[in-house]
Image (cartoon, rainbow, N blue to C red):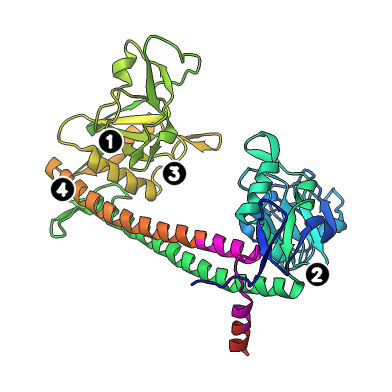
Amino acid sequence: MSFPRYPEYKDSGVEWLGAVPRHWRVMRIKHLLKSLEQGWSPQCEAIPVDSPDEWGVLKVGCVNGGVFNAAENKALPPELEPIPDLGIRAADLLISRANTRELVGSAAVALIDHSNLMLCDKLFRLRFDASVCSPHFIASYLSTGKVRGQIELAASGASSSMLNIGQSTILEMAVALPDSTEQVAICDFLRRETTKIDKLMAEQEKLIALLKEKRQAVIAHAVTKGLDPTVPMKDSGVEWLGEVPAHWTTCALSYRYEIALGKMLDEKRVTGEHLAPYLRNVDVQWGHINIESLPEMDFKGDDLSRYSLRTGDLLVCEGGEVGRAAIWRGGLQECYYQKALHRLRPRSTKDSTEFLYYVFHTAANLGLFAGSEGRSTIAHLTAETLRRYRFAFPPQPEQASIANRLNKIASSFERLIQEAETAISLLKERRTALISAAVTGQIDVRGLVKDEQEQAA
């Protein structure tokens, strides 16, 4: 749907803002404010408050995504005195002053009072004169690409993961404003239109979830029951497998596969006679291995055969998302792997990692590896544990048939999922563009708002 433009425009006098509707006023945000405060960040509990009778301190993430999330808070310890003046009221505009580059300057408006939730020192709280300025209009304005660019340019900090903006970045920000009535009309229009877009995105996200669920169900059935529904079945003796075809063999993984951890990472040995690329845990994603910009380490002597990769090797993550797997399909003249990965290699030609990959996909989705041995809070899938896992193996020709069928099915599902993800991406772009166009006066929605009101009357 195309939207009309305003009849007349003028130069805003602000280079990055450009032309704005003639009747809009260009002002600095500081001239619209009643107050701007920063909050307080005492040492708090790790859990949010349970009721409005408890005091809490907001976390900076409460404004991420443009919608105020009151659940993003930490409970104030009972021995600390709250500061009631830092409580949140309806129409407060909250802006993150410290965050990552993508999130610093994120803004959201509180829709109701949260008098028990206090402002933290990583947030600004802006209160406006309602007769002059709508906080919802300013929040939308701060999310536009032009303004985001100015905020990111002004952000500073020693770490790229945590940048800061000062009060002056917000106070001196230029904004073009229509009168308060038109601001409210624009916000009402955006609320209606973005709700429609959000609904469409939610439908696509639901479709993606259903496609992934269906894909996993198909894979799980194929690797535990086979492709022929008429074959006799037997109890596998393994709880998660249940019954399997009677002619399949159930045994410990180590009986069919060699399992070896990679080389211990030694950052000091980044020089040597035989520097070669190696794979890390992060390089192995489900069904895909990243081979670009790999780090290098010195491999020599026994290392060259002990930690080398052959086409067809299955690599399995030892830590992080334990059990995540992908097949090495080459692409480099030589490549090795570090200790964060297991290399699985068939002991004979009767087994195929193409089939085993889908077995791991199913086992991981069923939570088989969730109980792996762990150190601290990070789970680890030790080689000893992995060797003991029992799986069901059909004869090699059947493994190949199942893998070929699943490759085709997985590709079909992946195509449908990508189409849905593309649709979501386009809807997000449309949402962003619509908000930006409306709050910078590039489209005139007054007539549309009036039509909506007349239809509703």
Residue 390's image quarter?
A: top left
Look at the image and tell me whether residue 375 can be seen.
yes
Residue pushed farthest bottom?
A: 457
Residue linked to disc 4: 401
Q: Which amino acid does label 3 sit on?
A: Ala
Residue 98 percent coordinates (x, y):
71, 44
Label 1: state its secondary structure.
Answer: helix
Q: Is residue 318 above or below residue 245?
A: above
x 63%, y 36%: residue: 160
User: Are the residues flagged by discs 2 and 1 in contact, CB closer than 8 Å?
Assistant: no
Q: What residue type is labelled 1?
A: Leu
Label 4 vs 2, first from the N-terminus = 2
Q: Which amino acid does label 4 sit on?
A: Ser
Label 2 vs 3, first from the N-terminus = 2
Looking at the rendered structure, which numbered label has been put on residue 253?
1
User: Are the residues flagged by discs 4 and 1 in contact, CB closer than 8 Å?
Assistant: no
In the rendered image, residue 299 lying in the magenta stretch gets the answer no
Mark nearest the camera among 2 and 3 is: 2
Looking at the rendered structure, which numbered label has been put on residue 130?
2
Q: Give the range drawn in magenta.
A: 430-450
Q: Toward the viewer: 429 or 35?
A: 429
Label 4: state its secondary structure.
Answer: helix
